[in-house]
Image (tube, grey):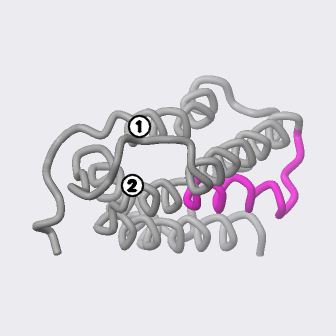
């Protein structure tokens, strides 16, 4: 299966990662008014597994290229990926205006993960899917356990 891939540089993968990280960079520099996200996590093992999955799928979407994929173009999957990023940004806006309801936590956890999954599907980067799904599961567990239940 891996013979369908080559190592290279996928700039759109890196751009997606950087764009998704912008709210986190802002949050690190400027805390939100009711910043519940700064508490100590109750899921450290799940968080560690999630971080490992995150870095694996980020590396995969940035350096693994399917030989059968075309140049990136505006397709339904790319549009859905962009919509997920917009939903994610909306969650951060709500968070910064002081809304910390469960739906905001879900907006801050699920859409960014789905954007990476949709991007991986569009680019036919199937090795990135397993760690991306693993990250999504861990990220959801983190969000639900620490901030919803």
Give the residue at mark 2. Answer: 123
Query: Which one is in front, 18 or 28?
Result: 18
Total tally of numbered discs in the picture: 2
Query: Which one is in front, 67 or 24?
Result: 67
Where is residue 114 drawn, in percent x and y?
58, 61
Using the image, tell me which numbered label, if any, was put on residue 66.
none
* Quarter assignment of residue 14: top left
Q: Is residue 105 magenta?
A: yes
**Callout 1: SS:** helix
**Callout 2: SS:** loop
Q: Is residue 101 magenta?
A: yes
* Quarter assignment of residue 49: bottom left
Badge 2 or badge 1: first in the primary sequence? 1
Using the image, tell me which numbered label, if any, was put on residue 12.
1
Q: Is residue 63 left or right of residue 3?
A: right
User: Which residue appears farthest toward the left when viewing the image?
Assistant: 3
Give the residue displayed 84% in from the left and 52% down from the top.
Answer: 100
Where is residue 126 drawn, in percent x and y?
33, 68
Query: Which one is in front, 64 or 87?
Result: 64
| 17 vs 81: above or below | above
| 70 vs 102: above or below | above
Region in magenta: 98-114
Give the residue displayed 63% in from the left and 44% down from the top.
Answer: 82
Quarter of the image where the N terminus is located: bottom left
Report the Cα–Cα distance between label 2 and label 1: 10 Å
Eye-nearest disc, 2 or 1? 2
Q: Count neighbours of disc 2 (C-alpha within 10 A) and say few if under 14, some if 14 to 19, many if 20 or more.
A: many
Q: Count neighbours of disc 1 (C-alpha within 10 A) and say few if under 14, some if 14 to 19, many if 20 or more.
A: some
Q: Answer whether labels 2 and 1 touch (C-beta < 8 Å).
A: yes
| 97 vs 139: above or below | above
Q: Is residue 134 left or right of residue 96?
A: left
């Amino acid at each position: 299966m891996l013979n369908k891939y080559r190592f290279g540089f996928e700039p759109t993968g890196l751009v997606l990662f950087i764009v998704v990280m912008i709210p986190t960079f802002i949050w690190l520099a400027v805390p939100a008014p009711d910043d519940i996200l700064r508490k100590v996590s109750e899921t450290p093992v799940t968080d560690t597994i999630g971080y490992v999955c995150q870095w694996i799928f980020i590396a995969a979407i940035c350096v693994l290229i399917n030989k059968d994929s075309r140049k990136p173009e505006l397709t339904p999957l790319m549009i859905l990926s962009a919509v997920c990023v917009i939903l994610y940004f909306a969650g951060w806006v709500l968070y910064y205006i002081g809304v910390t309801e469960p739906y905001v936590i879900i907006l801050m956890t699920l859409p960014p993960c789905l954007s990476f999954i949709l991007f991986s599907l569009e680019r036919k980067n199937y090795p990135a899917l397993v760690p991306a799904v693993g990250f999504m599961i861990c990220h959801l567990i983190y969000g639900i356990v620490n901030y919803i239940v």
